[in-house]
Image (spheres, coloured by chain):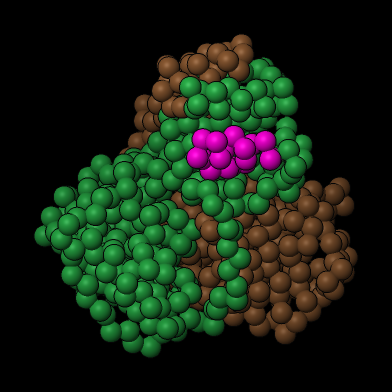
Amino acid sequence: MKILVPCKRVPNPELKLKIAGGAVELGDTTWQVNPFDEYAVETALRLTEKSKGGERSGEVVVVSIGPKDTAAQLRQLLAMGADRGILIAGDDAALDADRVARTLKAVVEAEKPDLVVLGKQAVDGDDNQVGQLLAGYLGWPQATFLSAITLAVDGKSATVSREVDTGTEERRVRLPAVATVDLRIIGRKAVRNEALAGPEAEWEDTQRLASLKGIMAAKKKELKEITAESLGVSGGILVKTLRHENPPARKAGVKVTSVEELVARLHSEAKVI
Amino acid sequence: MSATLVLLETTSSNLRSASLPAVTAARELAKQHGGPVVGVVIGAGVAAAAADAAHFVDKVLCFDHPALAATLAETWAPLLAAAVKETGATALVASATSTGKDVLPRAAALLGAGMASDVVAVLGAKSFRRPTYAGNALTDVEVTTATVVCTTRQTEFAPAAPATNAGTVENQAVAAIDSLGSELVALHATKSARPDLTEAKVVVSGGRGMKDAANFQVLEELTDLLGGALGASRAACDAGMVGNDLQVGQTGKVVAPELYFAVALSGAIQHLAGMKSSKVIVAINKDPEAPIFQVADYGLVATWESTLPALIAEIKKLKTA
């Protein structure tokens, strides 16, 4: 089982976002792997494991499109356990979801994975498009917003759970396919490859951290740097970012001192009850 | 003078109310594109729903086929793309529901069209405003392709009202359907007598501080007293206190009710992203430093245990007064 995991680096979402002159200022941010993509790497690793941290079978390839510094995030994913990395040179300003999907299509055609797993959205752009676009461009089945995935013993299909507005949906998809993962994919028993792991297999309910041994091993793993042009990708972006601004601030609220005061204000001041 | 297409989701016999705000967005976009608003209904046995949908748009294209019962992007996206091409439409819209978010990007890929996600305002024929960075920025984007695709945030557009004269329904021939091997195994729908989270006028959400599923009963009592919907933070869902479909936030549902109660809920930025457009926000938390107080119109520093029974009693008193 070969699994490709596209990952994006994002500015630390816990830091206060600075916007000036219509632009987001990221000069002094710290960069990290998009949390949903980190969950995708964890998912891919579990799908190649017999048990938590146990014997592995298969290959997990991580790929990112970004500036040279993105190598640091890919190294971190290699330290987590991914086998190989590909960094495609790219400038964020020259990328949109469509260009990313078309570049990934070229990577898929070169790498021929059985499964592509990625986060359902990046927490900076919040587009929630790349997985679906990639599946559309490839003509592959798609399984989005997954909270669970089980690979069939023959490696030819997967049964997935998806969180939808009205509840939970179970689907079966044929491989190769594109899967995008939601938060709960890292549940203890959410991910399993029937060919490797029994129904008793259980993982931590969080993504794994890189161990010291992992960090040392990552230094020796292959991290190939290539260009989109070398993959034959051309064309520009389809969605231009014009400007950013701060959302309107909420006006300062008041602290009330009692339930009676709260209800009185909600009734006569805010007129909502 | 090109049409604007809008994907209309249906229940067994009706238009889903979640699609109504997208009709309003499509009307705004149609003013820019100069043509009619054409609804697209896809499913199995959806003739009645299509007839209902026709009250909201100028025309409905109905793809009705047994193989279209499951909401699969693999089968729905090619039909949407074909409908765009056949009608010469220059815009394709859907509400940013779990279906819209799944299907529309795939249709955009098939059309080679640029797409704007989770739009909160239509700025022009091809330009849109949308939240990014978990709602910490509003970003204006411009689609550069001849056809534009977008999903629209339900809470930011008013639900469309039905017209007295219904538009026409055109049944579309459905050629071979290839689901690429994808199939729906089961849908475990959450049953609730309460209004939909995204449509409720009042939302009562509990957080990690509720400690236990049983404690949500008191929140449910407040919710039902106000005719609202129950919500929760990620922490409360993760702890198994309530189902995941009640999660409000960047992951989960985006809500903007008239009144939002955040109870024993700290207010992580991911949660705020899903509720800070609410008209009036009430926070009840024992920690005066909780970030939720920064967005609350009314804050009460107290435990939920000491507050909620009294709050319920006080509101009951008001209702019977």
B103 vs A184: above or below: below
- The chain coloured brown is A
Pick out the residue farthest to the front: B320
Does B302 sit left or right of A87 as displayed?
A: right
**Quadrant placement of the N terminus of chain B:** bottom left
Does A132 sit left or right of A41 as displayed?
A: left
Q: How many labels, in total?
A: 0
Question: Which residue appears at 16% of the width and 50% of the height?
Answer: B31
Residue closest to the eye, A10 or B78:
B78
Q: Is residue A222 magenta?
A: no
Residue closest to the eye, A30 or B300:
B300
Question: Which residue appears at 78% of the width and 62% of the height?
Answer: A189
Locate residue B193, reporting x and y percent: 54, 52
Does B226 sit left or right of B287 as displayed?
A: left
Residue closest to the eye, A250 or B131:
A250
Looking at the image, can residue A21 be seen?
A: yes
The magenta segment = B216-232
Locate residue B96, reporting x and y percent: 42, 53
Locate residue B24, reporting x and y percent: 27, 49
Looking at the image, can residue A230 be seen?
A: no
Question: Which residue appears at 36% of the width and 41% of the height?
Answer: B156
Please identify the quarter of the rendering in which residue B316 is found: top right
A189 vs B130: above or below: below
Locate residue B66, reporting x and y percent: 42, 83
Display colour for chain B: green
Q: Does the magenta stretch include residue B218?
A: yes
Question: Which residue appears at 27% of the width and 69% of the height?
Answer: B51
Please identify the quarter of the rendering in which residue A5 is found: bottom right
Pick out the residue farthest to the bottom: B176
